Amino acid sequence: MPNNLNYSHISKPFIITAVILAFIGSSIGSLWMMSFFGIALPQFFHNSFQLHKTLQIDGFLILLIMGIGYMIIPRFRNIPLASTNLAYLSFVLVLCSITIYAIHQILPITENNNNLLKWSNLLRLTGIIIFAIIVFLALRVRPKLLRLSDYFIALSIITLIIINIVQ
């Protein structure tokens, strides 16, 4: 790829991880559907059906939105990201959050597991807020084309933050 200001490799780990989580989540969903149709599955699979939502929504969707946001917004404006290190930090925080939440769903519910859930939500929200700050810093530069897209980008990021606060 050319070494332009508007090209960054930061989106690759987000999108690759999102696709992997989508594949795993879809596989779990397929097993779940097989159990609906009467196919006998080991008990371990029945305990892991909750992971389908976690991997598909909390994993795939959030990481894909963040990865595409980190790729498209600088390209529209022909600017570099404010901080690639903070972008990688947001990736690690969201990925750790998904991992902790998945562990929480598999383990029996105890007081310590509820603390894990709080930490998971805090890590995810922190990663999303870092993403929002980086994107809002990039939105200060007006694009030459598609100026109305800024409103939709801002609304989608605000919605992502609100959903994670309410959850």
Image (cartoon, rainbow, N blue to C red):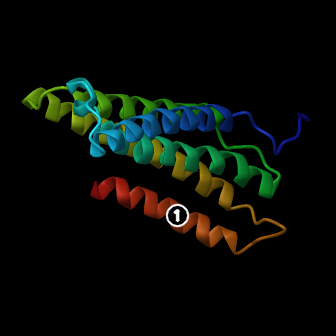
124 left or right of 103? right
Q: Is residue 122 visible?
A: no
Amino acid found under the numbered disc labelled 1? Ser
**Residue found at x 88% / y 40%:** 4
Which quadrant is home to the C terminus? bottom left
Q: Residues within 10 Å of mark 1 (few under 14, many from 20)?
A: some
Percent coordinates x, y for residue 28 in the rendering: 39, 35
**Residue found at x 31% / y 31%:** 102
Q: Camera-side residue: 155 or 42? A: 42
**Residue found at x 50% / y 43%:** 60
> What secondary structure is found at the residue carrying circle 1?
helix
Q: Camera-side residue: 124 or 83? A: 124
Q: Is residue 38 visible?
A: yes
Percent coordinates x, y for residue 69 in the rendering: 63, 51
Q: Camera-side residue: 102 or 137? A: 102
Which of the 4 image quadrants contains residue 50?
Answer: top left
Percent coordinates x, y for residue 80 in the rendering: 76, 44
Percent coordinates x, y for residue 119 in the rendering: 27, 34
81 left or right of 98? right
Residue with the mark numbered 1: 156
Q: Camera-side residue: 35 or 152? A: 35
